[in-house]
């Protein structure tokens, strides 16, 4: 009787949920920043070995970029939603309100991954820092384009400066994130957001 050989499986299936592991990695980066998050911290939180991490996500920088994408689509998704509001003032209000809520979410790290994730880094963290600079600039550009649209529609006065308004909003939101990371309460930060809107140009 001829010997039958069993085919070896092609590649071993992953024994962990990559989506859940990435969620845990995002929270580590969010709470500790790029350089503060060691590989031991990351793999422990993700519940996997370094070998599994490299195989599934690449190196630490690759993992950070994937975590930032997840953060953008999750906790920071208020930015994209705010752009859909019907008026420029409502866009601004939704953006700042979203910033307050996202940076003070119960059960999550305080502050903003996109703001504090790599503000101060040495040479190993330069790429992560540059990625976050680009991330923040992209949000400012999206707001600027939305406010240009508002000027064209007559929702903002003709002399309004869309670039300055966008930079103003992101600066206030970034400050809210820093204050939240320092322990400022949500209600106090909401008052800051409300005050910022008092100087919003009339239609």
Image (tube, grey):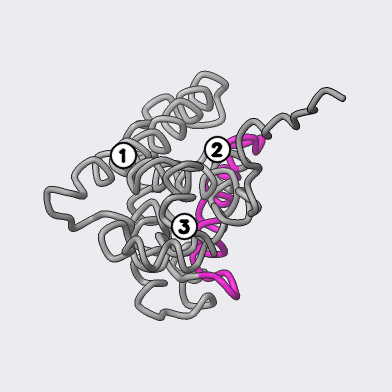
Give the camera-side residue of 152 and 102.
102
| Mark 3 closeness class: few <14, some 14–19, many ≥20 residues within 10 Å | few
Determine the main secondary structure of the stretch shown in magenta: helix
The answer to whether mark 3 and mark 2 are in CB contact below 8 A is no
Q: Return the disc, 3 or 2, that comes first in the chain's sequence.
A: 2
Q: Is residue 74 left or right of residue 128?
A: right
- Tell me residue 28's x, y (percent): 44, 64
Q: Return the disc, 1 or 3, that comes first in the chain's sequence.
A: 1
- What residue does disc 1 label? 131
Query: Magenta includes 99?
Result: yes
Query: Where does the magenta region start and end?
Result: 82-108
Q: Which quadrant of the figure has residue 31?
A: bottom left
Where the N terminus falls, by quadrant?
A: top right
Mark 3 or mark 2, whichever is nearer to me? 2
Q: Residue at x 42, y 45 (%)?
A: 54
Which residue is situated farthest in the left direction here?
A: 123
Q: Residue at x 65, y 53 (%)?
A: 15
Query: Magenta includes 132?
Result: no
Q: Is residue 170 left or right of residue 9?
A: left
- What residue does disc 2 label? 88
Secondary structure state at the residue bearing disc 1: helix
- What residue does disc 3 label? 198
Mark 2 or mark 1, whichever is nearer to me? 1
Q: Return the disc, 2 or 1, that comes first in the chain's sequence.
A: 2
| Mark 1 closeness class: few <14, some 14–19, many ≥20 residues within 10 Å | some
């Amino acid at each position: 009787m001829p010997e039958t050989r069993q085919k070896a499986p092609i590649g071993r299936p992953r024994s962990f949920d990559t989506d859940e592991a990435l969620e845990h990695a995002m929270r580590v980066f969010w709470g500790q920043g790029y350089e503060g998050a060691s590989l031991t911290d990351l793999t422990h939180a993700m519940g996997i070995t370094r070998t599994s991490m490299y195989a599934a996500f690449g190196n630490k920088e690759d993992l950070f970029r994937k975590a930032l994408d997840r953060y953008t689509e999750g906790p920071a998704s208020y930015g994209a939603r705010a752009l859909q509001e019907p008026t420029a003032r409502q866009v601004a209000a939704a953006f700042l309100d979203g910033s307050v809520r996202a940076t003070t979410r119960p059960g999550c790290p305080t502050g903003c991954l996109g703001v504090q994730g790599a503000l101060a880094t040495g040479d190993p963290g330069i790429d992560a820092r540059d990625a976050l600079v680009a991330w923040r600039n992209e949000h400012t550009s999206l707001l600027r384009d939305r406010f240009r649209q508002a000027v064209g529609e007559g929702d903002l006065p003709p002399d309004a400066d869309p670039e300055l308004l966008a930079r103003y909003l992101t600066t206030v939101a970034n400050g809210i994130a820093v204050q939240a990371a320092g322990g400022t309460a949500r209600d106090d930060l909401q008052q800051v957001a409300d005050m910022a809107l008092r100087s919003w140009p009339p239609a």
